[in-house]
Image (tube, rainbow, N blue to C red):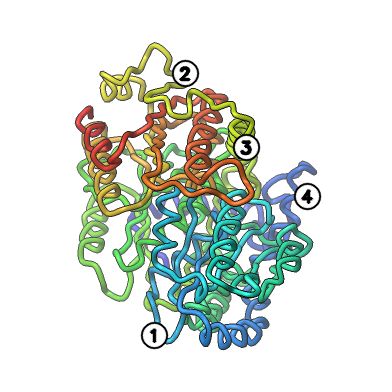
Amino acid sequence: MDIKTNNTAENLISEGLLKLERMGFLERLYKKDATVWKSEKEHTDIINNSLGWLTVYDWTLEKVSEIMEFVADARKEFTHCVVMGMGGSSLAPEVFRVLFGHKKGYPELLVLDSTNADWVGSVRKKIKPETTLFIFASKSGGTVEPSSQFAYFYEEVSKAGAGEPGGNFIAITDPGTGLETLAKDKKFRKIFLNRADIGGRFSALSLFGMVPAAIAGVDIKEVLESAKKAAASFGPSADVKTNGALRLGAFMGAACLKMKDKLTLIMPRDIETLGLWIEQLVAESTGKEGKGIVPVAGERDGINDYKDDRIFAYTAFDGKDDDARKKADAILKTQYPIVEMEMPELADIGAQFLIWEIAVAAACAIMGVDAFDQPNVQEAKTIAKNILGNLASGKEDAAAKSPFTVSKALEGKVVIENLAQDIYSVLEGHDYIALLPYVCDTKEIDAAFTALRKEILHKTKRTVLFGYGPRYLHSTGQLHKGDGNNGVFIVFSADAEQDIKIPGQKYSFGDLAVAQALGDFKALDAKGRRAVKIHLTAPVAESVKKIAKLF
């Protein structure tokens, strides 16, 4: 796969490729040599169990017959399919859902990666539980979000009169997990056991990505073969200088070392959701040890608002979306480094997954970080769990729904009445700002946050990240806490319009979402990050518009 560039990008690529050649990266990668990233045992133990993704397309191709046999039965019984998962278990299915749409004769795919009660409720309104297949997807089996979603929908299927509710559920997990045990106890229709040597964010071409895609009617054999075909040009015998995956990785890694760390993704609208998957892969893999490449997905503003810390990656698709093409062409005329890739057909999404995975592994080698751990992801989860434990004991944290809270790093520096000026005044160097709402993704709310994001970018020329919680906890959340303290974070929570009780728990989805928002805020605070938490009043879209007026 060819990677086109301009001169400034080509200079970075040359620097990065030189580093990769000197370390023998490509040969060592395919020998699965963990020391290309780290030599310490605590790292090599993780890395040695994380490289199965390199050729997983071959393994998954052997499973296609089994998958399609199951799909043939599912088509006869189910009108919808709901994926319950987070991060690596949900983002690839979401890419397939959006890119390929609903295919006649197959269950309509829905992806639920939120604990927001209104979001959960919106999915419930779209389906009939008795004719819906639910996929409980979790590598570990113990993730709170899909576990809570499962408890709710299992009860909903039972209420609908299903004799064996487990017949409406399948599991995708690693061997020996608690989810495998649960699936057997609840008599799930099917258990798909994935390879254990693949981390969640590298699992798109494994069963985690391919099973939901096949159920939705995607030709997964074609997708996997596109990855296999592309792999021939990425392998150890390929010329390093024309290896598209290495060139992309060299570009990202070398740029980050020169403080050009804002990787801005330009994509036609038809494939823009791919940016969410890339965002997680890049942020969670590189954002640690005081370093990090900051992926910028879904941004719609022009080059007049960019600082010199930007690099760009444009993916051309089937000649579509003149706006994306025009933006890429405009950047090519500047000194901003930009690379251009091509995705000729939808099935080539398989090749895209693989090129980005290899590229990120290469970039991390250049940066000297372990691409496969996520040392800071657990912190917010643990705090949220403690908040929920206190809530179940009748002790509510006063900060959970406090209208305005600031971290220790901003005490005395930021007040709600002067929010914009105060936040702008604490920005340093190449800092970014992140808007992190734990609310339901509706058209009105999304439009309000898009306008706020655009306003902040225009006023500050700073990169403005945006991500719905708790989704971003499994994506950019690692970067937020693991990079060099380069962000200012605005966390938003809100009460649910219609809360939903979680069966078997003393708390609701509304409680869980608010606890997760507070948990992440406290985790950011504990790391010395500059963070603000705002609890929005109803209606949420109007509250966001009022906040925007302060900027």
Which three-letter amino acid code belongs to the residue tagged 4? Asp
Query: Badge 3 is on which residue?
Result: 385
Q: CA distance from mark 2 to mark 4?
A: 35 Å
Query: Badge 2 is on which residue?
Result: 409
Q: Is residue 488 above or below residue 278?
A: above
Query: Badge 1 is on which residue?
Result: 104
Q: Is residue 521 something one can see in this rendering?
A: yes
Dot 3: element: helix
Disc 1 to disc 2: CB gap under 8 Å: no
Q: Quadrant of residue 52?
A: bottom right
Q: Is residue 15 something one can see in this rendering?
A: no
Q: CA distance from mark 3 to mark 4?
A: 28 Å
Which three-letter amino acid code belongs to the residue tagged 3? Lys
Tell me the mark number nearer the camera, choosing from 2 and 4: 2
Tell me the mark number nearer the camera, choosing from 3 and 4: 3
Dot 2: element: helix
Locate residue 122, reporting x and y percent.
39, 58
- Please tell me which of labels 1 and 3 falls first in the chain: 1
- Please tell me which of labels 4 and 1 falls first in the chain: 4
Q: Residue at x 50, y 72 (%)?
A: 81
Locate residue 131, reporting x and y percent.
50, 76
Disc 3 to disc 4: CB gap under 8 Å: no
Which three-letter amino acid code belongs to the residue tagged 1? Lys
Dot 4: element: helix
Which three-letter amino acid code belongs to the residue tagged 2? Ala
Disc number for residue 45: 4
Query: Dot 4, how many residues are within 10 Å of its Cα: few (below 14), some (14-19), or many (20+)?
Result: few
Q: Is residue 172 above or below residue 385?
A: below
Locate residue 35, reporting x and y percent.
73, 50
**Residue at far top of view:** 412
Tell me the mark number nearer the camera, choosing from 3 and 2: 3
Tell me the mark number nearer the camera, choosing from 4 and 1: 1
